[in-house]
């Protein structure tokens, strides 16, 4: 149960004055559904204004507050602007210009002959000074003195700056005083204000210490929750699995294991012989051989007389893993089965019986493998593919499936910078596959100007004529997923005119059956060209697809470009990746594309991606490696996360955990940032 002291923050934003159904929509768009969200809706920047006695004291381009007296109202013909001519105390003239419906308010606010205090940016239009859409118009100068330094908030359609500022002021009135959860020595060393003061200061000006303090709170909550998960996991009873090697000896792998694979298998083997359940993340680039490592781990479980299960995020990936594992494991005689949501009737029943009587050793499937109706004789190891698709909550659910808590090996093909690994997977040990198996050919990566689209289409025609296949990834349109979809459908229509039925389209809004059918046609070789948006992970392994075209490549993050490129180069044939670039390349865009040509090391690209995006470029949620944080920026994560991690460890190991006085405050912090699954674990579920 959430502590009572926090309840005022979790009240619906409709409880604030002036929030009705009309405002609810734009607030929801910004994620401001509760009082807490509004209190944490921090300004993007601040406008600094100067009060001047007359316009002679001001410069063009400056934000000012000045007293003006309107002398003329001038309406334009048609849809032109509405202009008010006004003069200052020295007799200088200035035009106040309004567009659209704002002119109705302007007439009322600025009556002829009456002096008003006006705040806005001074511009010049021809020979005349002007202020376009003044920010504020007041009768008394005192009303504007508090606006000399004014916050500018992120908005959604239907919201104005004054409205948001008013809601923030109300929300801050609900913020309680809470006990300090940060180690006192650290607060003193960093000169940080208290939590409540930090919230107020962050809305008043660009107060770096207040902003860092608020970011640190979020990072500390996350580190603490992940540490509690780790400790709770250690305290759980698992099943020690010691294999005798008899099955692994029979494996006939297509090529020898790399040093990184051998090292990772050794680390996993060391975890499995412990009685406390393993919680390990296996990071490896596309094609680095994660599946083989997972199979070795699952065979250890089978050698020890237990069962293993592999969970994939989509049905297509589950089928793909099943085929790969079945082929690799064939010489061992191990029984590998597949279970998806599609399996019905007798086939499903006999499969469920095989799990209960233990005749099925390894089960591969989607979420269906954890339904209530699915029981195992002795499930001792769970492998989760594409870890980032499953939250901590879901990982904990898996713990209920074995007689004791199963060991868990999570895998991801998204190379994650070390800093973010700690942020997202702080409760796990990490193994990295940072070598490529022999025989993988490098992918020839080229940058091509968008205007050479005709040449690219001709190249695809030649490519398909040789019997090979290709991907075409459509541009990421910033505005919305619907725009992405429109771009993809337009490109699909154009390519279909040229290539007819050989082209299929896949995007995130297709019904699962239609998506699977299109993927199936491509995987089987029936379709030669797959057009896709980026919302979908093109996770099919099609060795015959050796050409990847990425349109407007400069719009993607490095990590995402690298992921997409990894879809080709899976067979023995030479593969090519064409990065189509638009006309106007930013410096960052140029550097990204140059790096893509220069290296295929996913871990290096992930670090470079963080460096390039860390320079203040906002992290688009779909850009790449979305962080689990709302307040902490990338720079703050890099700077403060190691400190938060150490502070969390101190609290648990030295300062008496959540039972101490600081621990009680930290418990509030976990609830405040909704990391309370950390608290639930302490209570045993």
Image (cartoon, rainbow, N blue to C red):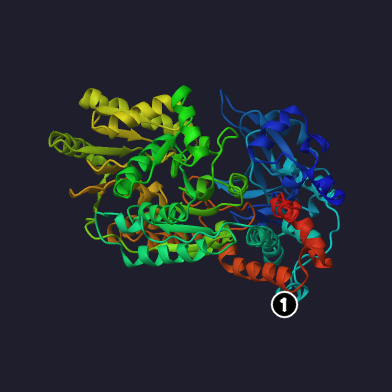
Could you say which is closer to the camera, residue 550 or residue 416? 416
Identified at 22% across, 55% down, the residue is 441
Could you say which is closer to the camera, residue 325 or residue 71? 325
Q: Position of residue 59 (x, y in %)?
A: 61, 57
Identified at 23% across, 27% down, the residue is 502
Could you say which is closer to the camera, residue 585 or residue 490? 490
Q: Quadrant of residue 663?
A: bottom right
Q: Quadrant of residue 33?
A: top right
Q: Is residue 510 visible?
A: no
Q: Crowding near pointer 1: few (<14 within 10 Å), some, many (20+)? A: few
As drawn, 454 above or below 228: above
Q: Is residue 269 left or right of residue 261?
A: right
Query: Residue under circle 1?
Result: 189
Give the secondary structure at mark 1. helix
Q: Is residue 644 left or right of residue 487?
A: right
Q: Is residue 321 visible?
A: yes
Q: Position of residue 399 (x, y in %)?
A: 61, 48
Could you say which is closer to the camera, residue 49 or residue 466? 466
As drawn, 131 above or below 278: above
As drawn, 662 above or below 344: below
Q: Position of residue 236 (x, y in %)?
A: 65, 58
Identified at 26% across, 33% down, the residue is 529
């Amino acid at each position: 149960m959430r502590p009572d002291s926090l309840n005022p923050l979790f009240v619906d934003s409709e409880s604030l004055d002036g929030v009705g159904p009309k405002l609810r929509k734009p607030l929801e768009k910004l994620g401001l559904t509760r009082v807490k969200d509004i209190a944490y809706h921090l300004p993007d920047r601040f406008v600094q204004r100067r009060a001047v006695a007359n316009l002679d004291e001001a410069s063009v381009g400056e934000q000012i507050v000045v007293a003006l007296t309107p002398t003329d109202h001038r309406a334009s013909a048609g849809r032109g602007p509405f202009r008010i001519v006004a003069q200052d105390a020295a007799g200088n003239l200035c035009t106040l210009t309004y567009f659209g419906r704002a002119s109705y308010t302007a007439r009322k606010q600025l009556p002829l002959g009456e002096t008003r205090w006006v705040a806005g940016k001074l511009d010049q239009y021809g020979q005349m000074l002007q202020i376009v859409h003044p920010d504020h118009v007041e009768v008394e100068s005192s009303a504007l003195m508090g606006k000399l330094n004014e916050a500018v908030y992120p908005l959604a359609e239907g919201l104005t700056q004054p409205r948001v500022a008013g809601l923030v002021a109300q929300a801050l009135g609900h913020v309680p005083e809470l006990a300090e959860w940060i180690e006192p020595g650290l607060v003193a060393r960093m000169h940080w204000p208290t939590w409540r003061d930090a919230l107020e200061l962050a809305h008043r000006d660009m107060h770096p210490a207040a902003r860092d303090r608020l970011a640190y709170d979020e990072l500390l909550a996350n580190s603490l929750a992940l540490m509690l998960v780790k400790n709770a996991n250690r305290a759980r009873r698992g099943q020690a699995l010691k294999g005798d090697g008899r099955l692994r000896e029979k494996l006939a792998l297509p090529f020898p294991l790399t040093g990184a694979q051998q090292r990772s298998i050794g680390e996993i083997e060391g975890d499995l012989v412990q009685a406390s359940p393993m919680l390990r993340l296996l990071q490896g680039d596309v094609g680095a051989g994660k599946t083989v490592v997972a199979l070795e781990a699952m065979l250890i479980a089978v050698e020890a007389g237990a069962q293993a299960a592999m969970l994939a995020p989509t049905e297509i990936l589950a089928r793909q893993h099943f085929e790969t594992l079945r082929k690799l494991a064939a010489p061992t005689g191990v029984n590998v089965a597949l279970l998806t949501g599609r399996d019905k009737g007798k086939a499903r029943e006999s499969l469920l019986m095989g799990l209960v009587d233990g005749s099925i050793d390894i089960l591969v499937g989607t979420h269906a493998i954890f339904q209530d109706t699915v029981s195992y004789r002795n499930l001792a190891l769970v492998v989760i593919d594409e870890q980032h698709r499953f939250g901590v909550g879901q990982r904990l659910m898996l713990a209920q499936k074995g007689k004791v808590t199963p060991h868990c090996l999570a895998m991801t093909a998204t190379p994650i910078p070390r800093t973010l690994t700690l942020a997202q997977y702080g409760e796990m040990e990490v193994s990295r596959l940072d070598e490529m198996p022999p025989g993988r050919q490098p992918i020839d990566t080229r940058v091509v100007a968008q205007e050479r689209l005709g040449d690219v289409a001709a190249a695809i025609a030649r490519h398909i004529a040789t019997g090979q296949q290709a991907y075409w990834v459509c541009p990421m349109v910033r505005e919305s997923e619907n725009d992405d979809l429109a771009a993809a459908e337009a490109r699909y229509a154009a390519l279909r005119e040229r290539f007819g039925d050989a082209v299929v389209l896949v995007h995130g809004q297709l019904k699962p059956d239609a998506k699977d059918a299109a993927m199936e046609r491509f995987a089987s070789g029936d379709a030669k060209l797959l057009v896709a948006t980026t919302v979908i992970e093109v996770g099919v392994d099609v060795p015959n697809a050796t050409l990847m075209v990425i349109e407007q490549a400069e719009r993607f993050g490095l990590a995402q470009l690298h992921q997409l490129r990894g879809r080709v180069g899976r067979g023995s044939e030479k593969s090519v990746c064409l990065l189509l670039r638009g006309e106007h390349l930013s410096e960052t865009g140029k550097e990204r594309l140059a790096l893509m040509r220069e290296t295929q090391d996913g871990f290096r690209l992930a670090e470079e991606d963080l460096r390039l995006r860390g320079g203040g470029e906002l992290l688009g949620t779909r850009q790449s490696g979305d962080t689990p944080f709302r307040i902490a920026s990338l720079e703050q994560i890099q700077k403060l996360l190691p400190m938060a991690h150490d502070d969390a460890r101190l609290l648990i190991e030295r300062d008496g955990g959540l039972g101490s006085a600081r621990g009680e405050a930290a418990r509030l912090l976990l609830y405040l940032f909704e990391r309370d699954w950390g608290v639930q674990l302490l209570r045993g579920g």
